[in-house]
Image (cartoon, rainbow, N blue to C red):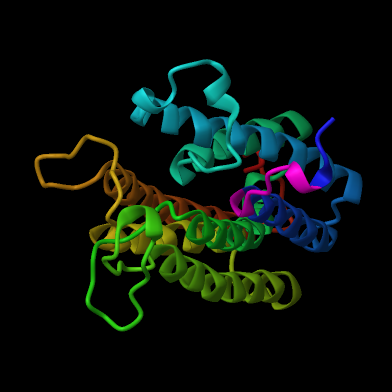
Amino acid sequence: MPSLSALPIHPYGILLALAFVAGIGMGIINGRRLGYSTDRVLDLSVWFLVSAMLGARVLYIVLYPAQFPTVGSWFAITRGGLVFFGGFLATALTVIGYGRWHGLRLRDMGDMIAPCLILGHAVGRIGCFLNGCCYGRPTDLPWGVVFPRLGDQPRHPTQLYEAGFLLILFVIAQRLFWRRMEKGWAFPGAVWGSYTLAYSLFRFAVEYLRGDDRGGFFTPAALSISQGIGLAGALASLAWLYLCYQKNRYERGTKGGTSDEPAG
């Protein structure tokens, strides 16, 4: 039996676990404001966790099949090998299905989840920095970081750029959620739509500074796969915000009456 000192410790795996703990903690806090029990949030978190890991891993395997010569290698996630957009798309479908199954309003769920996802994502990006993945292009700027396995050339710490952006976005999203619940500052669905719009645009921009393999496929406009998804996400976010705004106007206009529209 190996001693504890011989067991490998991967910072990426530790930060990934902390990311989920932080997200679930925020989910419990935010869920209470919507009347969700702790058991409800934990149940949703399990589905969220499983779908996020599967989606992020599957998309990575699809993009980089040469890195996975055996079935066992598919499950070695403690050293990296996840694509955020893969997990994001998988969890979005899971949340939609979960909400429909349990009769929960999707706009409320999205607004509750947004700050949790942002915080967990920020912590996860710090894990990427420690792991040396998702690195940036070479740079001569004074804050360039040398990743030993890539040579002596300083590179943009794009992981920290993203983590910093996400922490700021977390503060804004969380405050907007609180104000929505306390004072009605925003219509239901606005927190989620604002988050996805802001992140999609940021991700599109920061991709120009990324120096790792962008997936082996580029559009005729020389955009990476993530930039293509980012553009689609921005358009979808605008559509979401518009529909949520219109639905809120409809609900306010029929307040006191009976609406035969489905919850959403």
Question: 74 and 264: which one is in front?
Answer: 74
Quadrant of the drawing holding the C terminus: top right
Q: Position of residue 205 (x, y in %)?
A: 28, 63
Question: In the depicted view, which residue is nearer to us: 60 or 223?
Answer: 60
Q: Is residue 112 above or below residue 63?
A: below
Q: Is residue 224 above or below residue 136?
A: above
Task: Please indicate, yes or no, whether residue 199 appears anywhere in the rendered image.
Answer: yes
In the image, is 11 to the left or to the right of 135?
A: right
Q: Is residue 20 left or right of residue 189?
A: right
Q: Which residues are magenta?
A: 5-12
- Find residue 261 and report its horizontal and vertical position in percent: 62, 39
117 in relation to 162, above or below: above
Residue 96 shows up from this direction: no
Q: In this rendered view, identify the residue nearer to me: 73 or 105.
A: 73
- Asked where in the image residue 44 lies, by quadrant, the reply is top right
Which residue is at a point 33% across and 44% down the rendered structure image?
229
Question: Who's the residue at 68% across and 52% down the image?
Answer: 14
Question: Does residue 8 show up magenta in the picture?
Answer: yes
Taking 184 as reference, is 128 left or right?
A: left
Q: Position of residue 179 (x, y in %)?
A: 68, 76
Spot occupied by residue 22 in the image (x, y as percentages of width and height)? 73, 60
Please tell me whether residue 252 belongs to the stretch shown in magenta.
no
Q: Could you tell me which residue is drawn at 23 percent across and 71 percent down?
A: 139
Quadrant in which the N terminus appears: top right
